C-alpha cells in the first residue's frame, strides 16, 4: 500500500550580517527562535556578507565575523545536516534577482525605509548599496520561495517591502498576483513571505534600557570571558535606591534581562524580593549573571571548539551553499522566463 503523501514543510529563512560580535538581542530576538524553527520547517540560514559591504571596509574583519557567526549558529544548536547554513555571496544569483526586483520597485518604496529616512534626517550621505539594501534583502528571501522569516521587530518593515516587491514583480511581468482565491501561492512568479516575530523577545533591551544594538554601546555579547560578561552585567543601569528600600521590578533593566533566562516563577520570586526591600541591585545583577552563565556555558564550550576549526566551518558553509543553490537555480529560471530573459544554458 502506498504511503500517504507527506505535506510539504514550510520553508523558513533568515540572515544576519557579519558586522561585529553578536549579542543577547541577536540571540533571543533572532538566533534562538530561528534555530527552534528547524523542528517544524525546512530551515535556511545565511551570513549576509553582501549586505555587510554597505559598511565594512576591512576584508579580514568580514572573514573573521563570518566565521564567528557560523560558529555561533552551530554552537547554539543548528544542525547542519538537517538545516541549510550558507554564505549569501556563495549563491551569487541573489544579485541577479536583486537587479530584477529593482526594475519593478519605485524609488518611493526604498525612500520609506527607516535607514534611509534616518540618514536623510541626519543629513548623512548614503552609499547606493544602503539605499537598495531592502531590495537585496527581498531577493534573499524570494530566491528560496520562503514562507516565513523569523526576525526581530526592527526588520518587519523590510519584510513588508519584500512582500510588496514580490507583488510588483508578479503583476508587472505576469499580470496577476499569482495567488488563488484563498490567497495561496499558485507556483507562478514569486512567493510572498510572512514575518515571524516573537512578541516576548521582539525588542531585547540593552544595559541602558534602550534597544540592545551594536550601534549603541549597550550590548552584552553572547560569548566571551567570564570577566567580560561580569563587567557588562554589573554595568546594567539602575536607579540609585539604597539596599533597604523597596524597589519596582516592572521598571528595572536587570529584571527585564533576567526575564530572558528565568521561568515565570523565578521572575515572580525576584519581583517579590524587590518589593520587600533589603535586596540590592547588586544582588539582582549577580542572580542575572548566574542565569546567563549557566544558559550559555555549554554553548560557549562548543563555540570555543568550533572557532578553532576554520576548515570545519568552511566545509559546513560550502555544503550549505550547494544545497541552497539547488533551490535557488530553478527559481532564477522561473523568474528569467517570466521576464523574457533566456533560461540559463544549463537549465535548457
Ligand atoms: P544590531 O541592531 O545590533 O546591528 P542586527 O541589525 O545585525 O543587530 O540584527 C540581527 C538580527 O537580530 C535581526 O533579526 C534583528 O531583528 C535581531 N535583533 C537585533 N537586536 C535585537 C534586539 N535588541 N531585540 C530583538 N532582536 C534583535
Ligand atoms: N537586514 C537583516 C538585519 O540587519 C539581515 C538580513 C539580510 C536578513 N537579508 C535578510 C534577515 C533576509 C532576514 C532575511 O538583521
Image (spheres, rainbow, N blue to C red):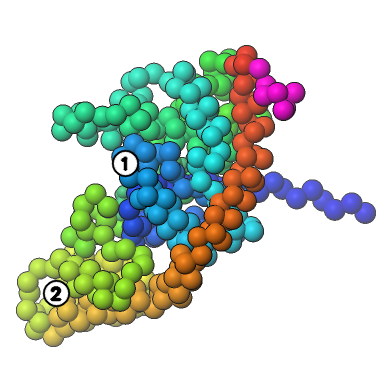
Residue occupying image coordinates x 22% and y 58%: 218
Left or right of residue 95, residue 248 in this image: left
Q: Position of residue 296 (x, y in %)?
A: 40, 72
Q: Toward which corner of the image does residue 256 lie, by quadrant?
A: bottom left
Can residue 36 be seen at all in this image of the molecule? no
In-front residue for pair 315/12: 315
Query: Start and end of the magenta stretch?
Result: 342-348
User: Number of labelled discs?
Assistant: 2
Instruction: Report the residue marked by disc 1.
Output: 57
- The numbered dot on residue 78 is none
**Label pair 1/2, CB-CB below 8 angstroms:** no
Residue occupying image coordinates x 44% and y 32%: 136
> Please, is residue 131 above or below residue 267 in the view?
above
Residue occupying image coordinates x 27% and y 56%: 212
Residue 347 in magenta stretch: yes
Can residue 87 be seen at all in this image of the molecule? yes
In-front residue for pair 242/90: 90
Instruction: Report the residue marked by disc 2.
Output: 247
Looking at the rendered structure, the secondary structure element under dot 2 is loop
Residue occupying image coordinates x 64% and y 33%: 329
Residue 63 in magenta stretch: no
Q: Position of residue 18 (x, y in %)?
A: 39, 49
In-front residue for pair 120/11: 120
Mark before the other along the chain sequence, 1 or 2: 1
Amino acid at each position: 500500500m502506498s504511503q500517504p503523501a507527506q505535506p510539504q514543510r514550510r520553508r523558513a529563512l533568515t540572515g544576519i550580517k557579519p558586522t561585529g560580535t553578536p549579542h543577547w538581542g541577536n540571540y533571543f530576538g533572532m538566533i534562538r527562535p530561528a534555530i527552534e524553527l528547524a523542528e517544524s520547517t525546512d530551515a535556511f540560514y545565511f551570513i549576509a556578507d553582501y549586505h555587510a559591504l554597505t559598511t565594512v571596509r576591512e576584508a579580514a574583519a568580514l572573514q573573521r565575523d563570518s566565521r564567528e557567526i557560523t560558529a555561533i549558529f552551530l554552537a547554539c544548536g543548528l544542525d547542519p545536516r538537517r538545516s541549510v547554513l550558507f554564505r549569501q555571496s556563495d549563491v551569487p544569483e541573489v544579485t541577479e534577482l536583486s537587479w530584477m526586483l529593482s526594475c519593478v520597485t519605485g524609488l518611493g518604496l526604498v525612500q520609506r525605509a527607516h535607514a534611509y529616512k534616518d540618514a536623510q534626517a541626519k543629513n548623512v550621505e548614503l552609499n547606493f548599496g544602503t539605499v537598495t539594501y531592502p531590495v537585496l534583502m527581498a531577493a534573499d528571501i524570494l530566491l528560496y520561495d520562503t514562507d516565513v522569516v523569523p526576525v526581530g521587530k526592527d526588520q518587519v518593515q523590510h519584510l513588508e517591502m519584500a512582500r510588496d516587491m514580490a507583488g510588483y514583480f508578479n503583476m508587472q511581468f505576469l499580470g496577476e498576483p499569482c495567488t488563488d482565491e484563498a490567497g495561496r501561492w499558485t507556483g507562478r512568479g514569486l512567493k510572498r513571505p510572512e514575518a515571524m516575530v516573537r512578541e516576548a523577545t521582539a525588542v531585547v533591551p540593552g544595559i541602558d534600557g534602550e534597544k540592545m544594538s551594536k550601534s549603541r554601546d549597550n550590548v552584552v555579547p553572547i560569548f566571551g570571558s567570564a570577566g567580560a560578561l561580569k563587567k557588562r552585567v554589573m554595568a546594567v543601569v539602575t536607579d540609585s535606591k539604597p539596599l533597604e528600600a523597596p524597589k519596582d521590578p516592572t521598571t528595572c533593566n536587570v529584571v527585564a534581562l533576567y526575564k530572558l533566562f528565568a521561568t515565570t516563577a523565578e521572575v515572580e520570586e525576584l519581583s517579590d524580593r524587590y518589593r520587600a526591600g533589603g535586596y540590592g541591585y547588586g544582588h539582582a545583577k549577580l542572580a542575572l549573571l548566574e542565569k546567563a552563565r549557566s544558559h550559555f556555558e555549554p554553548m560557549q564550550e562548543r563555540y570555543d571548539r568550533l572557532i578553532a576549526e576554520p576548515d570545519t566551518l568552511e566545509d559546513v558553509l560550502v555544503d550549505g551553499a550547494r544545497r541552497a543553490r539547488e533551490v535557488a537555480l530553478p527559481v532564477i529560471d522561473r523568474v528569467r522566463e517570466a521576464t523574457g530573459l533566456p533560461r540559463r544554458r544549463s537549465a535548457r
